[in-house]
Image (tube, rainbow, N blue to C red):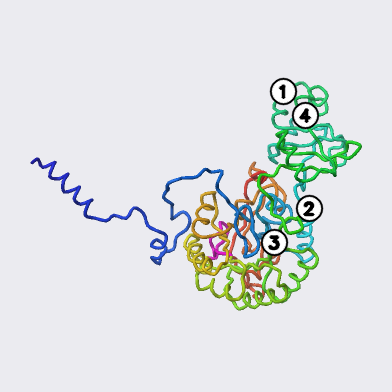
Amino acid sequence: MSAAKIMNQRTQQTFDDEEVPDGLPASRLFGQGITYTYDDVIFHPGHIDFGAHEVILATHLTKKIKLTSPVVSSPMDTVTEANMAIIMATLGGIGFVHYNMSLEQQVEAVKSVKQQPAGFEANPIILSPKQELKQIQDIQGSSGFRNACVTDSGAVGGKLLAIATPKGLHRVEGQSASDLGNVITAYQSHINDRSAPTASEATSPEEVQLIMAKHQIEILPFVDQSGNLVKVAYKQIVPPSLDSKGRYLVGAAVGTRQEDRTRVDELRKQADVDVVILDSSQGDSIYQIEMLQHLKQAHPGLQVIAGNVVTGAQARRLIAAGADALRVGMGSGSICTTQEVCAVGRGQATAVYHVGRVARAAGVPIIADGGVQNSGHIVKALALGASTVMCGSMFAGTTEAPGEYFTSNGTRVKKYRGMGSLEAMQKGSESRYYGDTQNIKIAQGVSGTVKDKGSIR
């Protein structure tokens, strides 16, 4: 027998005798006492016996609130105010309005969401016939709009002249006409199908969606008897997040101070907020437990999210105090420095897994908060036990995020900062980090800018 054949037999015997694990189950991986971030783990593919169209993303935000999309926006002052909360609800998620503002401002923001008619654009893009084609193309590139109404005044209330679409604008690109008005006159068929429908106040929400589906359009103008534009309906990608009265769902962040009890009272009484999140970098505290117990007694119908936590022991205490959901993460955000400054926290993948095990046994949903930089991280968070995923940096810099765009080194950007940054603390967020009673402020976050990302939609 040749030496090569003997070697092959021994090699085969080695593989036959040894039990080599082909990957690790989560219980073994996360039971080693080692902390892992999302980038430290990867999932093995399995066998697929269903189509992508059969995947259902509906989930619970809290014990009683259900969403059709498992993504929510963070209560950061450069991420979520009224516009962000509205777009999140239209896409089946929910936005949490930050509280780094006065009580009156937060109440008005929540009221704006509740008062926005479901199914209609909050800030529709309306073009004027006097605008040059180049200018419209720039607006299209910056805002990401696909369809826009053209009125004689360039605003809602003006006479509807046309519907501009990317396809139509592309067809007339390079034509001699310099402004949209001349294009509409000379190339009407390219900008607006003459048979494109409109709707009136008598059109039901169901009819609106059927009309858009039939005509394969993404917006439907509502006009009055004189042909003036009243409002603009949009094509629904997924069922929106609505309350029992057909209004958009919206959440708000609050602290754990005495004055925050009054803040919640007013948010409920004046704005009918659906859910509040106790916003603290370290949620396992006597302050949060007392606030949680107070709110559950004072507002029995209000859903309350507690956190942030990263261990099973922390989760058990807040669940016992009455939490309707838990927010998981500490120091894992892209602009958070809690782990470096305070030496506390946990890798986000490990935190989600361990808190998820405890919360799931108690029937309490968890929100994975922080460390999400791409869609793969969202998948990992959900697979490891999160019911929803909270995003901050992914939504910063979008059209719907608070703040004005400005140019930095030739790039169009918006501000983005951690709520533990000195800049945010000076505006009022220090209570989130138990720093409002200290003379010296210790930053647990940084400030920066993010590139313009266009609209979330």
Residue 299, picture quadrant: bottom right
Across and down, in percent, residue 430 comes to 65, 69
Q: Which of marks 1 and 2 is nearer the N terminus?
A: 2
- Asked whether 441 or 103 is in front, the reply is 103
Residues at marks 1 and 4 touching, judged by CB atoms closer than 8 Å: no
Residue 72, picture quadrant: bottom right
Q: Which of marks 2 and 3 is nearer the N terminus?
A: 2
Q: How far apart are marks 3 and 1 (CA)?
A: 47 Å
Across and down, in percent, residue 236 comes to 69, 44
Foreground mark, 1 or 4, reads 4
Quadrant where the N terminus sits is top left
Q: Which mark is residue 192?
A: 4
Q: Is residue 330 in the magenta section? A: yes
Residue under label 2, please give it: 116
Please, is residue 38 above or below residue 225 in the view? below
Question: Does residue 340 appear anywhere in the picture?
Answer: no
Question: Does residue 185 appear anywhere in the picture?
Answer: yes
Residue under label 3, please give it: 251
Across and down, in percent, residue 339 comes to 51, 65
Label 4: which secondary element? loop
Give the residue type that dot 1 points to.
Gly
Residue under label 1, please give it: 174
Quadrant where the C terminus sits is top right
